[in-house]
């Protein structure tokens, strides 16, 4: 027997046995979870008569026909887009700004480590849950019926929608802050406003800025959809072009929206990376 072969055998004898880091109990649990998910998926597909087999030849033929109607986009139509695009961005800016202002006191009231009043805490949490439950499209429909078609109902819908998201994210951030600074401020005689100003806000400011930028990105996309129910912005123009079967104009609009959204996402991501 060769020396190299003997050496290999000795190495294998002293080599520790690699054991799985997942216990049999956890493996069984993971398998059960996968089976439950697959069962729910199958049940839902049967109940809704929706199966992956519907992506058949007819489906792709319809896709091809639609692309044929939309391509090439009518780039000349872009000159009529810029005023509505600016309107959409203004809606997102105003809605996000108002939500940022009002979310600060609400998030403090919804943080159980700062707000010691259980009734006020529970009431605030309930109101925020209600705000998050209502979709922004339904909010837009409600406000359009109250104040009429235009930008203002869109701004109101974005404000309430953003407020629910921001206050929840920020309240959870406040609940995870270093309480030693808060206790030190209270021990030195600081009142509630001083505690929030000097012990809470400095700790949450980077996350607050990051959340605000994130919600602004969401509002840019949401404001496009709100235009379909008459809440102003570029979505209203897109809905008109689709309604009149101007698919090439609609494609040009879609490409412009895509470029704007990607650009805003890129800029806000760079700002968040610099802050966090």
Image: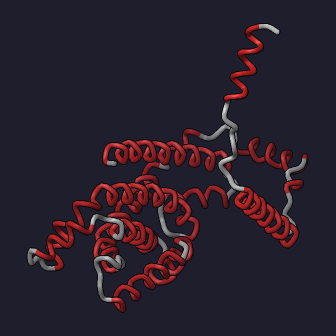
Q: Is residue 275 above or below residue 242?
A: above
- Image quadrant of residue 169? bottom left
Q: Residue furthest bottom?
A: 119
At horizontal 28% and vertical 64% (from top left) the residue drawn is 178
Q: Nearer the viewer, residue 196 or 133?
A: 196
Residue 156 visible to an observer of this rendering? no
Count the numbered circles shown: 0
At horizontal 61% and vertical 41% (from top left) the residue drawn is 74
Indicate the position of residue 234 as horizontal and vertical percent values.
50, 57
Q: Nearer the viewer, residue 215 or 177?
A: 177
Indicate the position of residue 34 as horizontal and vertical percent values.
76, 60
At horizontal 45% and vertical 47% (from top left) the residue drawn is 265
Q: Residue furthest left?
A: 189
In the rendered structure, the answer to whether residue 106 lies left or right of residue 139 reads left
Residue 53 visible to an observer of this rendering? yes
Q: Nearer the viewer, residue 250 or 63?
A: 63
Q: Is residue 199 above or below residue 142?
A: above
Q: Nearer the viewer, residue 145 or 118?
A: 118
In the rendered structure, the answer to whether residue 19 lies left or right of residue 93 reads right
Q: Is residue 207 above or below residue 169?
A: above
Q: Quadrant of the N terminus?
A: top right
At horizontal 50% and vertical 77% (from top left) the residue drawn is 144
């Amino acid at each position: 027997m060769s020396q190299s072969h003997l050496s290999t055998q000795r190495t294998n004898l002293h080599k520790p046995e690699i054991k799985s880091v997942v216990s049999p109990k956890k493996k069984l649990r993971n398998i059960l979870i996968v089976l439950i998910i697959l069962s729910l998926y199958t049940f839902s597909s049967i109940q809704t008569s929706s199966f992956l087999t519907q992506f058949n030849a007819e489906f792709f033929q319809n896709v091809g026909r639609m692309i044929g109607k939309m391509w090439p986009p009518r780039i000349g139509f872009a000159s009529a887009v810029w005023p509505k695009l600016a309107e959409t961005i203004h809606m997102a800016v105003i809605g996000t700004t108002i939500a940022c202002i009002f979310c600060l006191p609400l998030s403090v009231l919804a943080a159980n480590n700062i707000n010691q009043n259980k009734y006020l805490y529970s009431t605030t949490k309930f109101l925020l849950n209600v705000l998050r439950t209502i979709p922004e499209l339904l909010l837009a429909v409600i406000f359009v019926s109250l104040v009429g078609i235009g930008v203002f109902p869109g701004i109101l819908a974005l404000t309430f929608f953003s407020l629910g998201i921001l206050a929840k994210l920020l309240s959870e951030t406040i609940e995870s802050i270093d309480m030693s600074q808060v206790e030190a401020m209270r021990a030195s005689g600081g009142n509630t406003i001083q505690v929030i100003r000097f012990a809470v806000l400095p700790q949450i400011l980077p996350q607050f800025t990051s959340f605000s930028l994130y919600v602004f990105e969401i509002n840019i996309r949401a404001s496009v959809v709100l235009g379909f129910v008459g809440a102003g912005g570029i979505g209203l123009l897109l809905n008109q072009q689709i309604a009149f079967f101007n698919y090439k104009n609609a494609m040009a609009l879609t490409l412009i929206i895509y470029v704007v959204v990607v650009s805003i996402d890129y800029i806000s991501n760079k700002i968040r990376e610099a802050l966090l």
